[in-house]
Amino acid sequence: MRKPDGKIVLLGDTNVGKTSLLHRYMERRFPDTVSTVGGAFYLKQWRSYNISIWDTAGREQFHGLGSLYCRGAAAVILTYDVSHPQSLLELEDRFLGLTDTASTDCLFAVVGNKTDLVEEGPPRAGRRPGSGRSPEVPKLVQPEDAVALYRKILKYKMLDEKAVPAAEQMCFETSAKTGYNVDLLFETLFDMVVPLILRQRAQGPPQTVDISSRKTPRQTRSGCCA
């Protein structure tokens, strides 16, 4: 198996839909999924490049593995649930620090998933769920909240806003169930990652790990790859 040219990692709390986003894009379906244990990946060919996309577990007991998966990542997708503000706060409180092992020029996307479950605007009094539809809940995380987090990420990474993609380019709202904006999310990142791959090649050996190797890195736990 060919070594990946670049790596993208999905981070976020449990049940925000990371696995579903990846299945929707790679397999064109919305599966009944269970919580990811440790991590899993797909290999996507984009133009003439192979890009690995890593799905990670959001549960506390697997939290420490996140920095291993982020090692050398060219892009990180920080995912939250638009109906649960706490899932956005968790990105800053629990997951942002895991990206310290990513590439120094790593890109960050802030993604609000599950838009199919929310209604726009304030809750309507006396509303009854329609037959055959999932009950809608208020949309409690707005796009401007994601933009604010993106700017906090730049500050944490000590990055100049003028030297990186604008927040409007890197904040998305998606639905893994309907497919809304899922292709846009991944393919925008792929296009942005390609110049980083070329830059890394010009600077020296790639930072990605050969996933075809069966040897376990000395500092990783059994069954974990980065």
Image (cartoon, rainbow, N blue to C red):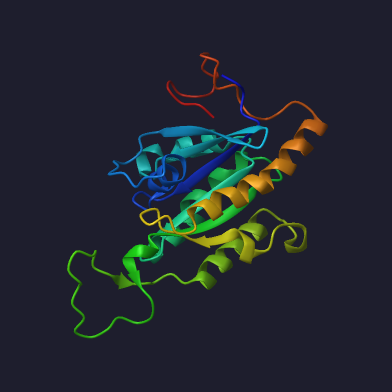
> Up-down: is 170 above or below 144?
above
> Up-down: is 94 above or below 140?
above
Does the image show residue 96?
Answer: no
Q: Which quadrant: the C terminus?
A: top right
Q: Position of residue 219 (x, y in %)?
A: 54, 23
Say left or right for 37 vs 218.
left
Q: Position of residue 137 (x, y in %)?
A: 29, 71
Q: Quadrant of residue 205?
A: top right
Residue located 76% across and 35% down the image: 200
* Residue sitting farthest toward the right: 202
Residue located 47% across and 51% down the image: 94
The number of callouts visible is 0
Q: Which quadrant: the N terminus?
A: top right
Say left or right for 99 vs 199.
left
Q: Position of residue 162 (x, y in %)?
A: 77, 63
Does the image show residue 175?
Answer: yes
> Up-down: is 202 above or below 17?
above
Q: Position of residue 102 (x, y in %)?
A: 62, 40
